[in-house]
Structures are given as structure tokens and as C-alpha cells.
Image (tube, coloured by chain):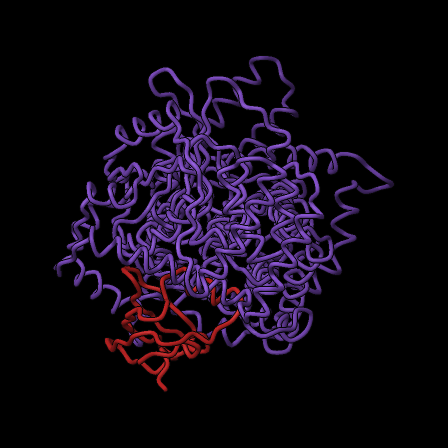
Chain colours: A red, B purple
Amino acid sequence: MKTLADLSKNERGKVSELTATGSIRRRLRDLGIVNGTTIVCQGVSTHGDISAYFVKGAVIALRKKDAEKIYIE
Amino acid sequence: MSEKKTTKKRGEYKIALAGNPNVGKSTVFNYLTGMRQHTGNWAGKTVQNAKGFYTYNGIKYQLMDLPGTHSLYSKSYEEACAEEYITFGMCDAVVVIADANCLERNLNLVFQVTEITPNVILAVNLMDEAEKNGIKIDIERLKKQLGLAVVPMSAGRKKGFEELKEQIENMCMQPVKKQNDDFGKTQGCMGEINRRRHILVQEIERIRGNDYRNGYFAMRLLYDEKYSEKLFKNLDFENSDEIMEIVKALRQELYSLSVTDEVISDCLTSELSSKAEETARDCVTRQTSRYKSCLNALDRIFTGRLTGTVTMVGLLLLVLWITIYGANYPSQWLSGILLGFEDKLATLFLKAGVSPWVVNMVVHGGYNVLAWVVSVMLPPMAIFFPLFTILEDFGYLPRVAYNLDYYFSKANTCGKQALTMCMGFGCNAVGVMGCRIIDSPRERIIATITNSFVPCNGRFPTLIAIISMFFLVSKSGVLGSLLSSLFLCGVLVLGVVSTFAVSKLLSKTLLKGVPSSFTLEMPPYRKPQFCKVLVRSVFDRTLFVLGRAVAVAAPAGLFIWVLANIYMGDKTILAHITEFLDPLGRLMGMDGVILTAFILGFPANEVVIPIMLMTYMQKSVLCDFSSLEELRQLLVSNGWTVVTAVCVMIFCLMHWPCSTTLLTVKKETKSLKWTAYAFLIPTLCGAFLCIAVNMLSKIFIF
């Protein structure tokens, strides 16, 4: 299965599952990352450790290890 | 805060300003109250509640600017504060400010607030920006859909305030009275939750009577038992144990149906999300816009794989160069004027019958140094700070965090530390307070302790002065200032690299742990309000720092004068002190006087050089220091070399934070231990580096 971290620049995906737990799960949900949300990757940083994503009208940057907890289809 | 204690003043209404981070709450607050709360284009700028007042149609309103929050259920400190105020602050109305660019996401909070109070006004801000982005919002439809008062606004352009004030007045005069008993779905997982919520609401009602918030309280208790602490602290609750027993039983039931806390949270958020999506689908239309693609192109440059770092260093250099080059002119102008007064002042004093000895001390000693502080220290501060604020308003700081995140992740810390580090360039105390945006306590303490590794605005002029005195003696003009900025940039990079190194060290030793998860919001670029930035920086910041410097420099000067004139044995007290510190100072490549100056500069770093000068002047002949060259001669005649200058710069970069910063550390960490570490770690690093430089120079130069 693909995760958000697999997206390269300008690729998009639809959220299918969230495996993050605890407060970050809640935070991601509150930012509008629920099942079915479309997310577009806006860019990957120089060292590839953090990427910017366009979610529901705003841009949010997530570290790779957190993006890997968001499965997409 | 607590409902138990507060009684409302008659004829004064309480309004809370809530909203997601970075939607312009503080801008609205400032406009309404005429106050000057700092604003900035990044999520987390406001970490403290700010209170202000305004009058409309003869009625006084108290306005509370809350820190930005995405959700009332969030566990982060400042968001929990916002929740507490909205829930227990006895507000007459809550104005939720939303960003028109991402209304859908913002509606999440709107729905949550309507669970607590029916007196909600939705202010859709940034309508102008949204229009440029090709987003249209049907306000009338939104009103109907939400059943709330909705005000379209463009706070930056001062639009929408009249209507907002009118709506607030209406709401205060005629509060909505209704029950909150419609909990939505009865099927599925949400149905299981809602059924139990209903039971709990009835129990709470039995004890406390009708309250709009009961439904919300019930939900919070089912979601998280710990919420009871907050609840019972703020409300008189008889039989609280009884309620908690019911809560525990209901939660147990949910658990047995495998409805865990996480499931509850998921159900709640997905329900709100779909509600928001539905509303947005009906009320918001999007078109492609050229403006937006321009902004995207900018972002590609500022955060690009190659261009990101290059532009970051370039921008830093540019800012430093403008600061140094630009400061020359006002410096010369100010010193011309201020030193011109010196003789006149002396003549005036002599005519008034003051003894020449006192005149010498007060005018040629005190006033001279003061004039130097003003003319050399003030201009760089007055230029750097607005430039920094312009970058902040523009929305660049989160991009810095994005570009630097790799290093912070290597140091096992939070990427948002870059934001607090950047704030430290302005003022370390502000930077330390800004550490609240970091949720993980471990990472927050690391960011707090390492904040003073970046030089604050008050330490900049010291660094600049030493650079131009000792490293660029014969160079002036554009080339000279360019070289100075390169030098200064090097010093700053040293500070940033030390931040990474010390953060990593702390992560491996005292504050072991893996980096926590976080989200970094990248706000859209916004045009800075140049005039406002200028006025605000000069009045709020520069004059404050200068005032502090003068307030500290004057008593410090007097103190030094007293020390230098009271004899103990055959030497003055000052000589005793400096001689006592001299061996340590020498070991670190400096001398006793410099160390004394750093110690006396504890209340304000800005005065280190002036104190140093005053102390040297007690020993040597007074000279006219209208130019840096003559100052250099004073220092050289007191034994300064290039190595001394390097060591002073290193120690200026790394020593104990000023008293204000340390007090803030104490306040924020609530721990003497961490405050002590915040004092010791930079000091030890600085001392160690200075000793190393001194040793190496002895080996290689001589």
C-alpha cells in the first residue's frame, strides 16, 4: 500500500487509512485529514526528510516518518 | 477565569476571539481595541491571551484574543487555554474568526464552539486574499446553512469591522436562548456514543440543572476522563464522585463495544469533517487564479531542493548587509549631534558651579558613553528589527523551519524549534516564550535551553562594533560593510550550528528521546504592512531595548564609578574585582575587565561594551571616541588583540542569557533545574570555546 511519503512533487492521493496514534492522530484529523481527503504533495525538502502537502486549502509540512502513517490510494 | 470567582461587572460585555492559528485574530483585536499586540504570518505567533477593551454605541466590551487553535480537543498547552476560556470564561459572545481561503477546515472549530455556546459569530476573514486566490464564498447561504451570524471581513484592509461590532452588539443585547439537545446521529459508532452521552447529560442536568454546555461536558468526559479535573476546578459540582462513577461505567461499556478513545475521536472528527465538507460544497466556489500560481512559484524558490538553502543564506546576508551599511549614516549623524552637546553641557555645568571633577565624571564619562550607546547601538537595532519583522509578516519563517528541519530531525528535536530560534534573533525572552508552540515537553525544554545560542537584537551591535573595529580596520563603504556582514553571518552560523550540536547532545544525554510528531503550517505569503512594521519596531522594540540599555547603563556607570573610587587597601574595589577575575579572563583570551562587564551586563546585554569602556576609562586617559578608530585605540592600549576580539565575540554569542530571558525560562519551565541549565550550558560552551581559541592561538601564532 502507498503512503503519503511515497508521493513525489505534484502527485496526489486520497487518504484511505491513518495509522498514527495519540495526539498527532487527532491533530491530523483536525487539519482535515480524514478518509477520502485528497492531498497533493507540494514539494519535498532538500534532504527529503520533510515534505509540504496541500490539504483542504492550506499547506502543511509533515516529516517523512509521520507521512508514512497516512495511507493513500 | 473560574466561574466560581468571577462576577460580571454591569454594562460590560465579555467577548472572546477564537479561531485557527494565523487567521488574523490579533489583527482584528488590534483594530478593535487600538492595542498593539504583535502579529506575524505564522501559526503560533500569539501564545498568550491578550485582553483589551473597546466601546461601541456607548457600551464597553472586553475583548480577549485567544491563541490560535485547530480544535478544542487538542492537548497542546495554549490550545487547552483557549478551550478553557471559551468554556468557562463566561463570555457573552464568541467570535470565531475563519480564513476564507480554507473555510472548510476552519468550520471544524466553528462546530465545536457551537457545542459550548449558541452565541457564536463567524467572522470570515481574508476575503480579499481569497478573492485573489479565485475563491468565492456565498455568505448568505453560509448564514442559512450554519444558522449563525456570519460577517465577511478583510481585517488587513479594515473592512467588515462595523458589521462585526454591530453583530456583537446584537448578540449581547439579545443572547440566543436555546437548548442543546440535538446530538445528531443515532446510528453506528456515533450512535453508541450519543446514546451514552444522552444518559450522562441527564445525570449532569439532575445535579447542575439546565446548561447549554452539558452536552459538551458529557462528550468531553466520555472522550477523556481527565477532563473532569478542568471541569470540577471551574464549576461547582456537587456529587462529582457520583458523576465520575457513571462516566467510568459508560466508558467501560464503550470499551467493551471496542469504542476506544481513539475511535471516539475518529468518529467525532469525521462527523465534523463531513459536515464541514457539505457546507463548503454548498457555499464555496473555486477557480484557478494567476495570483495563486505566482505564490506557488515563490514557494518553489524558497523551499526548493537547491534554491531553498541558497536563498535562505542570501536573505540573511542581505538583511545583515542592509543593517550594517544602513546603520553607518544614522550612526554618524547621531554621534555628531550628541557629541556636539558634550562641550555645551560641560560649560553649562561649570557655569552652574558644579565642581570640574564631577563635570568630568558625569559629562565626559557618563554622557559620552551614553552618546556612544545611542549612536552605535541604536541604528543597527532600529534597522534589523523591522527587516526581520517584514520577513516574518511575509510568511518566511515557516519556510526557514522547513529548510532547516533536516538538522533538527538529526538532533532528535522538533522542527518548530527553528521558529523559536528565529524569534530569538529578535529577543531571546520572546523566543523562549514562543517555545510553547512545541508540544512535546522534552523538545520544548531543549528549545528553551538552546535559545540564547542565537544572538538577540541587543547583542548584534556589540558584534558589529567589534567586527568593524578589529577585522576591517581600513575598509569602509560598500565593500567594508559587505565583508562585515559576511563576518557577522559567520558568527550567526556558528550560533545556529551550536544550537544543533547542543540540542543533539541534550537529546542523547539529559533529555533522551525520539522526536515527536508535529505538523508545520506553511502560511500563504502575504504583503507585509511596511508602515506599520516600521512604526511598531521603532516604538515597541527599539525604544524599549534602548530604554532598558540606558536604564541599566546609568546605574551601572554610577556603580562602576563608586567601585573605582573607593579604596580597599591600596587599590580600588574595582581593581580588586577586575584583578580577581583577570586570571580567568586571561585563560579565556580576554581580561578581568571584559569579564566584569559581561557580569554587570547580566540585566541587559546591550551594555557590555559601554561598561567595558567605562571601566577602561577609569584607568586610562579620557579620549574622544567619536569614531570607532579611536575606540579601537582605547581597547588596543588596554591590551586587546585580534584574539581578544574573537574571544569576546564568541563569549558574546555564548554566555548566560540576560536576566529577562532567564526569568522567562523560569516562568515557562517552572523549574529551577532547567533555568540553571539554561544559564550553565551556554556559559560553559562559551568558556570552553574561548579557552580553546586562546590555547590554539598561543600555539600557532607565537
In the displayed structure, B47 sits above or below B259; it is above
B467 vs B627, nearest the viewer: B467
The image quarter in which residue B687 lies: bottom right
Residue B564: x %, y % from top left? 73, 38
Q: Which residue lies furthest to the top in this view?
A: B352
The quarter of the picture where the C terminus of chain A appears is bottom left
Q: Which residue lies furthest to the right in this view?
A: B569
The quarter of the picture where the N terminus of chain A appears is bottom left
The residue shown at (68%, 73%) is B509
Residue B463: x %, y % from top left? 50, 55
The residue shown at (28%, 56%) is B524
Residue B372 seen in render: no
Residue B669 seen in render: yes
The residue shown at (25%, 41%) is B143
The image quarter in which residue B486 lies: bottom left
The residue shown at (32%, 41%) is B122
B93 vs B663, nearest the viewer: B93
Residue B234: x %, y % from top left? 62, 39
Q: How many marks?
A: 0
Q: In this view, does B238 lie to the left or right of B467?
A: right
Q: Residue furthest bottom?
A: A1
B307 vs B95, nearest the viewer: B95
Residue B180: x %, y % from top left? 44, 42
